[in-house]
Amino acid sequence: MFQRRGSSDVWRYVVDSLYSHCTRQTYICHKCQPIREENLDNTLTVKENVCFSSIYTGCERQGINIEEEGHMTPIIQHGNVTFVYIKYNNLYLVATTLKNCNIALVFSFLHKLVQIMIEYFKEIEEESIRDNFVLIYELLDEVMDFGFPQTTDSKILQEYITQDGHKLEVAPRPPMAVTNAVSWRSEKIKYRKNEVFLDVIESVNLLVSANGNVLRSEIVGAIKMRVYLSGMPELRLGLNDKVLFESTGRGKSKSVELEDVKFHQCVRLSRFENDRTISFIPPDGEFELMSYRLNTHVKPLIWVESVIERHAHSRVEYMIKAKSQFKRRSTANNVEIIIPVPTDADTPKFKTTVGNCKYAPDLNSVIWTIKSFPGGKEYLMRAHFNLPSVLAEDSEGKPPIHVKFEIPYFTVSGIQVRYLKIIEKSGYQALPWVRYITQNGDYQLRTQ
Amino acid sequence: MTDSKYFTTTKKGEIFELKSELQSEKREKKKEAVKKVIASMTVGKDVSALFPDVVNCIQTDNLELKKLVYLYLMNYAKSQPDMAILAVNTFVKDCEDSNPLIRALAVRTMGCIRVDKIIDYLCQPLRNCLKDEDPYVRKTAAVCVAKLYDINAQLVEDQGFLDLLRDMLSDSNPMVVANAVAAISEILESSPTAQQVLEMNASTINKLLTALNECTEWGQVFILDAISNYTPKDDKEAQSICERVTPRLAHANAAVVLSAVKVIMKFMEMLDATSEYVLTLVKKLAPPLVTLLSAEAEIQYVALRNINLIVQKRSDILKNEMKVFFVKYNDPIYVKLEKLDIMIRLTSQANIAQVLAELKEYATEVDVDFVRKSVRAIGRCAIKVEPAAEKCVSTLLDLIQTKVNYVVQEAIVVIKDIFRKYPNKYESIIATLCENLDTLDEPEARASMIWIIGEYAERIDNADELLESFLEGFQDENSQVQLQLLTAIVKLFLKRPTDTQELVQQVLSLATQDSDNPDLRDRGYIYWRLLSTDPAAAKEVVLAEKPLISEETDLIEPTLLDELICHISSLASVYHKPPNSFVEGRQGGLRRVLPPKSSSYRKHTRRGNLAEQETQAVVENMGAPAAPQATVIPGVDSLIGDLLDMDLGGPSMAQQQQMFGGPSQTPVQTSGAMDLLGEGLDSLLGGPAPAGDGGLGGLGDIFGMSQSQSYTPPQEVWIPAAKGKGLEVTGTFIRKNNQVIMDLTFSNKAMQPMAGFAIQFNKNSFGLIPANPLQVQSPLPPNQSASTSLVLNTTGPIQKMDPLTSLQVAVKNNIDVFYFSTNVPIHVFFTEDGEMEKRVFLATWKDIPAQNEVQYTISNVEHNADTVSAKLRNNNIFTVAKRNVEGQDMLYQSLKLTNGIWVLAELKIQPPNTNFVVSLRSGTPDIFPEIFQILDTILHN
């Protein structure tokens, strides 16, 4: 059972993926207390309040201290063991290997594991893991065998590994889909009303230098689907893809040049490679069908200029100008401009014509929120802080200004869904719904 | 109600309580108890005492309970092997259950119980499961074969499981195929004996490519990785595989994309690099690589480490994508550092302005590691892009003005390197540098500053004061700083002898009398002797012109790079080390020592550097035709840090020996400096002055080097007396003083004197022709011999011979004309200027297509790397670089033939193995047999 020591309520938690020969293992661990020494044959670095992961290699247990060794890279070599980890909330998901394994696969798998657990338990943190440890054992057993990832589609997993499995009288059987070519969809799905929702979401990544030069401007788009369709439907999606248009002689129509496209595993890649057709049998429910990337040369949608006047030992003043550089008929919603301020600033004062300002000491920032920001407008905000007369010891970095926004009914790239054809052998009619939205991605403007 | 309740329990009699609960009749209670046991196990408590009680619960039709018991078994079976046997029956029974989930569960668990006694019972159930009607069971059984192989390889081979596994590659179900591929790859990795059974051929690869379209994302990775290990039979097959793999670049899973990149990068090597197809393929690779940088940070890191390799192999792939590597504020530090590395790789004149602006921005960040690396990067830019050097220098000056301590120190270190690359160009900034003297507290920065002051002493008015101020704390300084200070003050003295005499005496006495450091003492003595014997010579030595440093030394050497390209996406590609350097070999029982990953290696080489550079200058000035600059190519970890330093080379002790030994091997060339030093040292050591031809015999002796000459083949009989009507001609070829010399001995075995000797060569491959007429004692009385040396030119008419080195000679005397044919040992054509610059070597090696590479093994060589390179050097085979990987010495060598043909060699030495592997590359592969022949001979001589 857990050991509680002193007043600290930090817990140690380890779940092994459990096969006794561990060339590769997966652990989930948490900030922990020292484990009792006698339980470990070869315990290395064990310290108070550190994350601890233990493994069996053959018969010996080893541990490492991720928080001490691990901040430089997510891969730690310790003796002949390599520890590979990702961090989620306060949990570390750690995989270990003795071999020259495929490291990209390990990281992809660990992230997938997080996703599966989120879909199972809504959130993953110490509590949810403790509350579901039996189920997690079952899941780990199913998604990974001898270090080889197996079925990781949570929809399918939920068909035979369930939270209330013990209530079932009849033992479940592996669904066909587990081993099918279509491993992401079960066959006997039925809906009274057959519907498909398509969300085209474009995120703008922007990096602007302190002197106002756009260093990088990139759109990462995603087409997300919610599919409520019966049976095994065949879908075909048509976009205004430039390559397709040019090859079919419609080069003059308005089209978009996608620089790189990535597809969900349901899409037939060789078909796309051949004639740019996006055809697939979709999974049931929500999933991301594809993502694409392209560089833009359009003006940054929301432009922020800042003038910062620092009077050491007394005060700092900000003058922020925000400008919307898109068409007047569009409107950006829930715009948040997050302006970093020194950690030791106090007594905030704001003045603005539009929206409202809030000082968020936990983020060391001022958040200027504008609920509705129509295109072609320009707003101004002034902020004033006092600074302590004593200078802080450690120097601070220069965090950039971040901007969050959403512009509905609009895509920067101009991408359009031309059609979504749905064919199922029962011949039902289904309705596709499409929605467009542009939002901020990694949207950073450096400050002086 | 949640499972967390299982974790809380009374501490007293816990095990006892559990025991009784496990024995309960009630099923629910039993299950609760097992859950508590598993919970205890999970937090690391030892609950092995409950083994029999838990195993008793195994006979149940409740799937959840069964899973938990199996879980427990896997954990504790090894500690209770005898008890584990109790479970065997259940396994066997479960393998025949009607529910495929249970059959699979049993076979999956079975493989994880690593108890020898059990294994034998499991073969039959496994065999059945491999042929199960349900693919879910088959795919699980396939993995079980790999598990079993890991426990008992022999058993798996004997039972024919490998054949069954291979047959599964043709299974109708894609998931089964994928797992079979994974299992096969795993087995092949650990055992070469399974090779003949599991070898992939064109038709299996074809099946795999078909399955590729149908299996899960993970299965696709297994398949792509397996394909990457296959060698297509020709370029057609390679291209068709590439074509079928290319669509995978559009997969959402980063692992699939990287594995596809690996296959393509590898097989593209086989294709014609100029073909349209390869050009479009290269274009297709860039976008997916860029997209990987939008993935999770950890995946970005893996991608960046791989991109680092890819741009070294094919620099054009990402040349227009500089901007995507710009660092973002919220990138994790490990991503930032990698991005910096790649930015430098992609820097060119076209984008340098942008890069510099970025680097300057980064240098004002707060993370010390990142800032330091950014400052170093600016220095690298200056050295890499010459037209931008000035801008870089002014950027560095701006940074120095920030007065941030570590920035200033780092900047001074790189400025020193810039001075070395562009001497006498930027001294105007020295004044600014000197302002920061007091703040320098890191040895490397102090040493760099002192070097700068010494180097430009004549332009710094108060150089003496500055150096004097350093001298105060001489004893407490790091040895790197001490050595530098000694040299700098001697330089100062030579430049301004009038007012610095006192200073130089002070430092010499500090170095020679008060120091325990032998390096420092020796250098002190050398300088002292030099200065007191012949100040003019001292000037020549100490103020010698130093070799310029170059930019591309941080590249991974081509053979390692090629190996790493084959490991794209794997751990090796992240470590930038070959797998055998971090994976324990299964057979041989040889435990490899893990190499220090970065810091210690880096420190070592770096520290060596400044201290050594002066020594090297001394050595270079001693008149050795080309001192062997056998420098170690740095590991990639130390890229930025060591780029500039490495060129100066931190020769190891052994290499120094070589250097000192160098001149003694060419005793003909003696310069004043050499005599001076040689005798100086000898008298210093109280030894007799060398009586030999070269001044450095003494030095050679000190270092225990025997004086060796280039290899001289024994004389062979060219014309036996019986055929020469009494004239016997024996001879051999040697190389001396940059010339090919034919040593001839004429013996008169006839009864009458001979006269009128003459010699003539037929046209030959190397254009050999006598430079002078033959001069032999004439007449030659009976029963007498006369020897002569005939100097040969290589300017004669050329005709390709077979074998290449064949030479047809006619000898004439007053009796008759005699013909003979002999083979000239090829090493006499190796010229003295055959030492290639390291950078050129790397580039040349890369440029020569791989099919022009031939490998030979030279067996039973009783030398180590150092004696080998000394021996080969005597024969004008030059060691360009030396590298030690895992106890393996790699020597990179170059040689040049008189007709301008270069041959590059890589020599692999693995002590205690006496078999050396030599790989030769050259534009003219015809000469390989001869080269190999002579290497073999030299090394055995």
Image: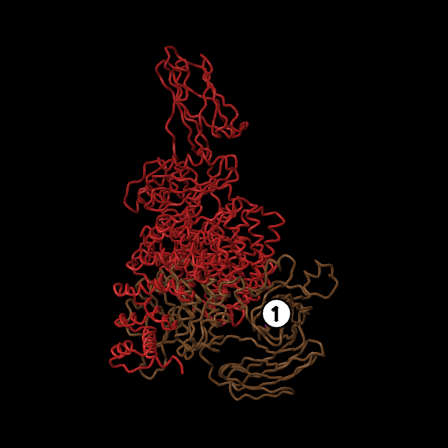
Chain colours: A brown, B red
Q: Which picture quadrant has residue A348?
A: bottom right
Helix, strand or loop at disc 1?
strand
Residue extent of the magenta highlight: A208-224
Give the side of residue B19 with respect to residue B802, left or right.
left
Q: Residue at x 42, y 33 (%)?
A: B736
Q: Which residue lies furthest to the right in this view?
A: A252
Q: Residue B75 in the image: x percent, y percent?
A: 32, 67
Residue A95 visible in the snapshot: yes
Task: Pick whichever, B393 or A357, lies toward us.
Answer: A357
Task: Pick whichever, B596 or A252, lies toward us.
Answer: A252
Q: Which picture quadrant has residue A63?
A: bottom left
Q: Residue B521 in the image: x percent, y percent?
A: 32, 54
Q: How many marks?
A: 1
Amino acid on which the number 1 mark rests in the picture:
Gly
Residue B488 higher or lower than B819, as above or below:
below
Magenta stretch: residue A220 in it?
A: yes
Q: Residue furthest front?
A: B98
Q: Mark 1 points at which residue?
A: A221
Task: Pick whichever, A372 or B741, lies toward us.
Answer: A372
Location of the C terminus of chain B by quadrant is top left
